[in-house]
Image (cartoon, grey):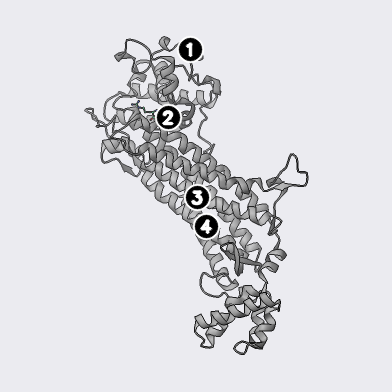
Amino acid sequence: MTDDRPDRPDTGAPEGDTATTAETGTPGDAHTLWHGRFADGPSDALLAFSVSLDFDRRLAADDLEGSRAHVAMLAEVGLIDGEERVAIVDALATVEAEMGAGEFVFVPTDEDIHTAIERRVAEIAGPAGAKLHTGRSRNDQITTDLRLFIRREGRAQIRRLLDLQEVLVQRAQEVGDAYLPGYTHLQRAQPVLLAHHLLAHFWALARDVSRWWDALDRVDVSPLGAGALAGSSLPLDPDLTARALGFQFRFANSLDAVGDRDYVAECLFVLALSQVHLSRIGEEITLWASDEFGFVHLADAFSTGSTMITQKKNPYLSEHSPRKAGRLIGNLTGFLATLKGLPLAYNRDLQEDKEPLFDAMDQHALTLDALTGLLATIEFDVERMQSAADGAAVAATDLAEHLVVQGVPFRDAHAIVGKLVRQSLERGIPLAELVETEPSLGKDALPLLEPGAAVRRRTTPGGGGPGPVAVQLEAAQAKLADERARLVD
Ligand code: ARG
């Protein structure tokens, strides 16, 4: 679902064709790919338990790609001849076409996507097809497939992150010098430009993009040629397959090659943390959309109604996206628990890598797309934001800093202004009046209390006033352009 390459075939067959239960056939009728060692076929219960086809069929395109590279290598090193190579490559193309057309028929003993494809290749190519698995194990095959999948899907996730970042930049540009209260402890603290606030989320997402690139670097290792765990007595050339698949590196240790799923855990972490970032954006929008804040109005297209309470317009999307973070955190911690204490090398436990990964990828992609749409259409109630930020007390820090400039130690300045704020609240006197009569402040300090004055005075690099935000906006645009260019490379 997150795959946006047009040339990736779907695995095709309708759900019901997935052979997970006895109703699709009698297991004893068909051969498993390991049938030689066994007098009896697998039980229905075993098949149902071990089958992973319903989720790993998503790796079909990657499995085909890995097989093509493997076959080319087998021919190159003389383990199959030219004719056999052509027969297998043609059969792989037929499989791809069948899957693309939704005509690929799975059989009950197709335990996973690897066995399904290999069985079909053997049916089409005859004896040559039976050579496809030479020197290869599903152990190096699956981790090759998964790395190819992440290499592609990771980039698709980056593209989505950049799209959301772009909306944040556009909206930041559009809102100009509008400002709102900045909060600490969810209490109004100091005003900042709305653009500054939006760009704060931009930088969190920029770190997610950077984390993706790091993770993808470690994904970029070919495990193909490690065999089941120990390499091979056959003259395989893992460098050749690594190059053919466009991997930057080849494994250094065959046990590690098949036993390593760090890269999956790492992607799950990148996804979980990024989802946490989205959850913070979502939660904030939910607050802002409440009557109490009233800072934003959501487009109808990104809101839901209540089945009972007629007047309601719920911020379903922004409200629900934070909950998805829990799910992604669960995917990460669940998978780490699977890995914990696993002895080398491949263990079937590792089959538990795909579902959390696919789920996290899908949920993250859905959230990114939806939040991008929401933020692109959200309406900011600038008047409300600004009037919330124009309360005189929000300028208190500026009054204290005004005293600092005149040589008053900051602690003393803090106490003087703090006392005025308290008196203003207790006695119901406007702060401006008290400021005017306070000898150390006086009339000179009154402009500090003007609407918008406090935000204009935030001038330090990276700060929330118009000067530094203009610089920041340019930096964000440059960052976005760099990342887009990197994605195209
Ligand atoms: N479906 C398996 C997985 O996802 C493929 C590897 C199976 N290897 C084995 N030796 N049974 O991990």
Q: Residue furthest left?
A: 233
Secondary structure type for disc 3: helix
Label 2 vs label 3, nearer the camera: 3
Q: Amino acid at mark 1?
A: Gly
Q: Nearer the viewer, residue 132 or 284?
A: 284
Q: Residue furthest front?
A: 426
Residue carrying label 2: 64
Q: Residues within 10 Å of mark 3 (few under 14, many from 20)?
A: many
Name the residue at 48% across, 29% down.
55
Residue 361: x and y, percent?
50, 41
Label 2 vs label 1, nearer the camera: 1
What is the spatial separation of the Cα atoms under label 1 and label 3, in whole angstroms?
Answer: 44 Å
Residue carrying label 3: 274
Residue 297: x and y, percent?
71, 54
Residue 47: x and y, percent?
42, 19
Residue carrying label 1: 25
What is the spatial separation of the Cα atoms under label 2 and label 3, in whole angstroms?
Answer: 31 Å
- Can I make out residue 368 in this image? no
- Residues marked 2 and 1 touching at CB (< 8 Å): no
- Residues marked 4 and 3 touching at CB (< 8 Å): no
Please state the quadrant of the image where ligand 1 appears: top left
Mark 1 vs mark 3: which is more N-terminal? 1
Q: Nearer the viewer, residue 303 or 247?
A: 303
Residue carrying label 4: 480
- Residues marked 2 and 4 touching at CB (< 8 Å): no
Q: Nearer the viewer, residue 8 or 177?
A: 177
